[in-house]
Image (tube, rainbow, N blue to C red):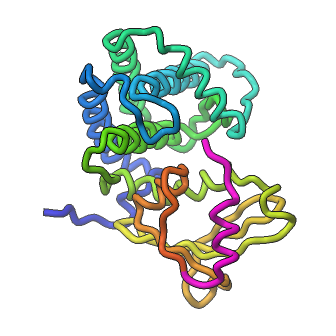
Amino acid sequence: MVETTRAADWNVMDFNNRDRLLAAIRDEADEFFTIAGKPENWEAPTASGHWQVRDIVAHITDVTEGYLEGFEMARTGQDPPAPPGLAAMADLADRNALALRDHSQQDLLNRLEGGFRKLMSIFEGLGADDWMGLLVHHKYLGPVPSFIFPTFQLVDYGVHNWDIREGLGMPNGIPGPVGDFLAPAMFSVWQGTLDAQRLGGQEIRIGIRVTGRNPGLYKVTANPEGLTYEPADESNLDAPAVIEFDPGSLVLTAYDRIHGGTAYGDREMIDRFRTAFFSI
């Protein structure tokens, strides 16, 4: 039976949903460790560019250890280094992942599982005031509220599970909890990955309609000064084009895995929107 819930139950910013979010992370991590732990899969290709399964394991090891360092800095009051920003993320993450290729499958998986357990223990210890009020240093973004880290951990395992399954030719898709929790956060991903130079000095106005258990209609405006978004309804959308996404397709599109969504309206505006972002 499909679980009946309210849209509010899938809001990552609401501390009341912490345990539901952590359960979704555990489900994805369990599947990840099962698939990545098979020796025959270790050097298999994935849908994450040139990375093999072992490189995705290395990447999540790198980001997990970065998350742990951020919480340690917050705990001890250390001054964090200046973040390089999302534009540098793809190159730096690639270098960090490939640097771990000399580790054995078992050693790297043990290292990742140990980091995962420590991180989940930290998440479980976050209180209501910490969820939005505790600022923790993120390697690429700088100080962000602590709820960002379990949200990104769901991205780490949910999206990369899709990458691995796709590369292995397995039945594939984004599970409901992953898509429903992450869909609203994809607007922030678009904010961070907008390449203003690709706009050619012009403005984009577009509606994004999201289905699923956390549905909504949003007006998105992108121009050389950045990208903004706000909830809308049909009466005040004021946009020449709309793209409708199911939650999983929105997540995979925002992370440049697929070019998804059903488009209505101004084709040129839609094409300009789809090509306005860099990959991370």
Mark yes or no: residue 8 visible. Answer: yes
Vertically, is 266 above or below 191? Answer: below
Residue 5, given in percent of the width and then of the height, sits at 27, 64
Mark yes or no: residue 130 visible. Answer: no
Q: Is residue 47 magenta?
A: no
Number of marks = 0
Please state which of residues 101 and 230 is positioned toward the viewer in this rendering: 101
Give the position of the N terminus as an image quadrant: bottom left
Identify the residue at image location x=62%, y=81%: 241
Please state which of residues 215 and 96 is positioned toward the viewer in this rendering: 96
Identify the residue at image location x=51%, y=33%: 50
Identify the residue at image location x=67%, y=66%: 273
- Left-right relation of 267 to 126: right
Give the position of the C terminus as an image quadrant: top right
Q: Is residue 268 magenta?
A: yes
Vertically, is 182 above or below 241? Answer: above
Please state which of residues 51 and 233 is positioned toward the viewer in this rendering: 51
Quadrant housing residue 144: top right
Q: Which residues are magenta?
A: 264-280
Vertically, is 222 above or below 195? Answer: below
- Left-right relation of 26 to 71: left
Identify the residue at image location x=26%, y=23%: 40
Residue 14, given in percent of the width and then of the height, sits at 45, 52
